Amino acid sequence: MAIKVGVIGCGYWGPNIIRNFSELDATQLYYVCDLNKAALDKISMSYPSAKITQNYQDLLADDQVDAIAVITPVDYHYQIAKKALQAGKHVLIEKPMAGSVAEAEELVQLADQQSKVLMVDHTFEYAQPINAIKKIIDSGEIGDIYYIRAEWLNLGLLQPDVNVIWDLATHIFSIVSYVSGMNPISLKANADAYVRKDIPEVAHVNVAYPNGITAYMTVSWLEPKKTRRLTIIGSQKTLIYDLINVEEPIKIYDKGIDLTDISGDIHQLRVNYRYGDVLSPNIKNIEPLREMCSHFAACIDQDKIPVSDGRSGLNVVRMLDATEQSLNNNGLEISLE
Ligand SMILES: NC(=O)c1ccc[n+]([C@@H]2O[C@H](COP(=O)([O-])OP(=O)(O)OC[C@H]3O[C@@H](n4cnc5c(N)ncnc54)[C@H](O)[C@@H]3O)[C@@H](O)[C@H]2O)c1
């Protein structure tokens, strides 16, 4: 029996989630809700068999609904997800999971108590290139990680309620933790607001990981050229992920620097520059959201813990909260341990 899903929020992102739940065999798009009647009517034209309502409580009260997807702005995530869990529904929440650490912690606890699946749409964790990168790192091919650099840049969309870190760095936080398997130790952030003066549009976040590894992250809503790039510099090779390059999203450079001890004297080391091949592994083109929605259904069906479960959502919210603390204290380093 297909899992009956109710989707709350059909603005910009919601229709993508709705399409996938409607296309998968494992799920049935059963109910759709939005405060905005026009948005709801548009969905209804494409999916006439789905029930519609402007009041999300209708979905929670319907015994037929097995699972709820919360695709509203972050301010509503906690309130709706909490009521959905209390109503005995499995819950998928958009990223970032909640607006505060306390709210995210409460949702994790509630999901445990209710024995319900709580999953966060950290979409990239379901993307083929990101999973390929995880395998490459785990295989040891690039050696020890020296440092990581990430740039997530584009023009807009300025969000009314959150700064650029909450919008764009959320993805990088989940990607870096996922591919490296490391938990962050501390971070520091600085940011600037040029257009609206009060909500930063550009930010730099440096996250410290174990073994002296730092991830240097830059996010911006003010750059005309869309950039989504992750560079992982290793002792053996360097991996560059470029989301915009659909044909060859990953390149592995066998280029680097080796030191040879020629006499046992630290001052006599010979520096050798390696200029080896560049390899671009073949990556299947599967829509990450389809994988994400399918994984949510499989976790409900098989009582499994999702890859991006409530706890991983909470970890990302902890990092976001730490960036706020750092910004409010002139870039102070904030511990995450
Ligand atoms: N995973 C990703 O890559 C990705 C991409 C874009 C957006 N998002 C996330 O998706 C969420 C929604 O973003 P968006 O850009 O679609 O926002 P949006 O403002 O375009 O759409 C949100 C919709 O939610 C509706 N809504 C708000 N409160 C509601 C309520 N109480 N009951 C019913 N409907 C309600 C609004 O009317 C609106 O139509 C955010 O959390 C955002 O971070 C994720």
Image (spheres, rainbow, N blue to C red):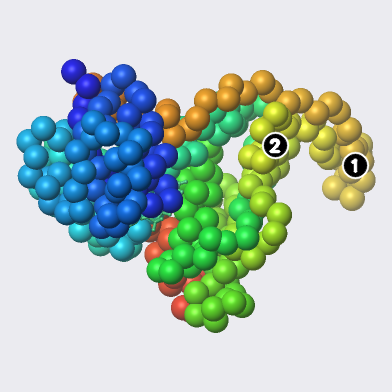
Query: In this figure, which residue is indicated by the disc labeled 2?
Result: 245
Count of numbered tags:
2
Q: Is residue 144 visible?
A: yes
Q: Is residue 190 visible?
A: no
Q: Is mark 1 within 8 Å of ligand 1?
A: no
Residue kind at label 2, given as amino acid type: Asn
Give the image quarter of residue 263: top right
Q: Is residue 73 left or right of residue 216?
A: left
Q: Position of residue 189 (x, y in %)?
A: 55, 68
Which of the two residues, 290 or 113, is positioned nearer the viewer here? 290
First of labels 2, 1 by sequence position: 2
Helix or strand or loop: what does disc 1 sit on? strand
Q: Position of residue 184 (x, y in %)?
A: 47, 52
Q: CA distance from mark 2 to mark 1?
A: 33 Å
- The correct choice, above or below, for 332 with respect to 39 in the image is below
Q: Position of residue 272 (x, y in %)?
A: 90, 37
Q: Name the residue rendered at 32%, 29% in the picture.
A: 22
Quadrant where ligand 1 appears? bottom left
Nearer the camera: disc 2 or disc 1:
2
Q: Name the residue rendered at 44%, 34% in the picture.
A: 289
Residue kind at label 1, given as amino acid type: Val
Query: In this figure, which residue is indicated by the disc labeled 1?
Result: 271
Q: Residues within 10 Å of mark 2 (few under 14, many from 20)?
A: few
Q: Name the residue rendered at 54%, 78% in the picture.
A: 196
Split into 4 quadrants, where in the image is the N terminus?
A: top left
